[in-house]
Image: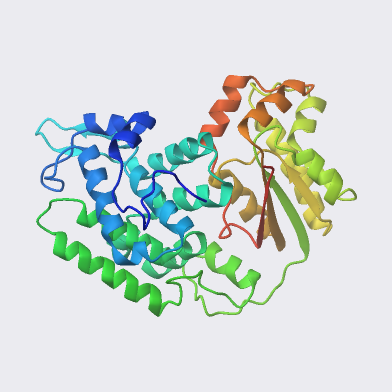
Amino acid sequence: MYFPYCPDETNWSINWAALESEFEWLRALADCPQDPRYHAEGNVLIHTKLVCEALVALPQWRQLPETWRSILFIAALLHDVAKPAATQIETDGAISSKGHVLQGAKMAQQILWDMNIPFKEREAIVALVKYGSLPLWFWDKPLPERSVIKASQIIRCDMLALLAEADVRGRYCDDQAQLLERIEFFREYAIENKCFNQPRQFANSHSRFVYFQKEQGNPDYEAYDDTRVEVVIMSGLPASGKDTWIQEHLPDWQVISLDHLRQSMDIDPDENQGEVATRAKILAKECLRNRQSFVWNATNLSSQLRGMLIRLFASYQAKIRIVYLEAPWHSLLERNKKRTLAVPEKVLYKMKSRLEVPNITEAHQVDWIIDN
């Protein structure tokens, strides 16, 4: 991937005039203040510019392949993109922006999707925005080891450390030296846990699954594979091709389709879905008890919803595979119009904004089927 505004060896300077002219979300950062106790440099745009300048000045960044340079540069541009929406000024004058990291990851995904950034690179940038502050705060987490190992499955920890270092160097604060020490500690900790520039390796996929399903686990433990049945959980926006994929790849499998259940039960998508979900789970439990593999076919857009299903299926010793499908936005809109039961366009946009792409820590196997 090549981002045209990313500096390179021919010219390491950043063309801020071009970037601000191109991206409205970048210009919006200028109107967002920051607490001078932690960000004495000024507003969010000033901070973002300093972070990008610091990143580009790092020798480790300059030595990276072009794609990774672009990924990190875009992540630096976007790392505080949600601060204008999340910032609040308290009565005592203190400024806070609670929740801006998770909100920023969702905003970044939408912005990058609209920019047609390729899926793999887009999700790497989103992960950098989401986990970018982990090197600073991982030791304060209830389970630091698990937090770092989980992040390593989704994004390289060495890249997280580079972004975090640029973030700290791009602010004026009294504790800058301490924050840089924390990042060095994170680097050492990730190296110690064998997950600095690669995902932490597990004995097998079941051992990895068990580790992330339990609060207290040992990453070196080789779990006995006691799975007895397979479950495929489909995930993706309406019209992304889930039905077609099932017909082509698992034609003989039992399919529990929430759309089909809605139709048979005469329940509108806008109505309460409790009865549909209950009926679907009854059918799923029958399959699980009979050790019959099946496909759970629904949009399954949030990790929370998928997690509830996965815990239920795993309690019956199921091996879980998630199949995520994605198509270009204009294709989804066109396909949706041709469907017998088209989803209202405003609902489709709302679903897109809620989408959380599945990651490998959720299941035994995750397949990302991307229609370009």
Q: Is residue 144 above or below residue 163?
A: below
Q: How many marks?
A: 0
Of residues 153 and 232, the one drawn nearer to the viewer in this rendering? 153
Task: Say which quarter of the image contains residue 263.
Answer: top right
Of residues 255 and 176, the one drawn nearer to the viewer in this rendering? 176
Furthest residue to the right?
Answer: 252
Percent position of residue 276, x then y = 71, 32
Residue 316 in view of the camera: no
Task: Say which quarter of the image contains residue 101.
Answer: top left
Give the side of residue 214 with respect to residue 268, left or right: left
Which residue is at a point 16% across and 32% down the rendered structure image? 90
Which residue is at a point 57% across and 55% down the rendered structure image? 359
Residue 168 in view of the camera: yes
Of residues 25 and 200, the one drawn nearer to the viewer in this rendering? 25
Percent position of residue 198, x then y = 49, 70
Percent position of residue 41, x then y = 13, 44
Which residue is at a point 77% across and 22% down the rendered structure image? 338
Give the side of residue 148 with respect to residue 55, left or right: right
Task: Say which quarter of the image contains residue 283.
Answer: top right
Give the side of residue 349 with respect to residue 71, left or right: right
Q: Is residue 112 above or below residue 322?
A: above
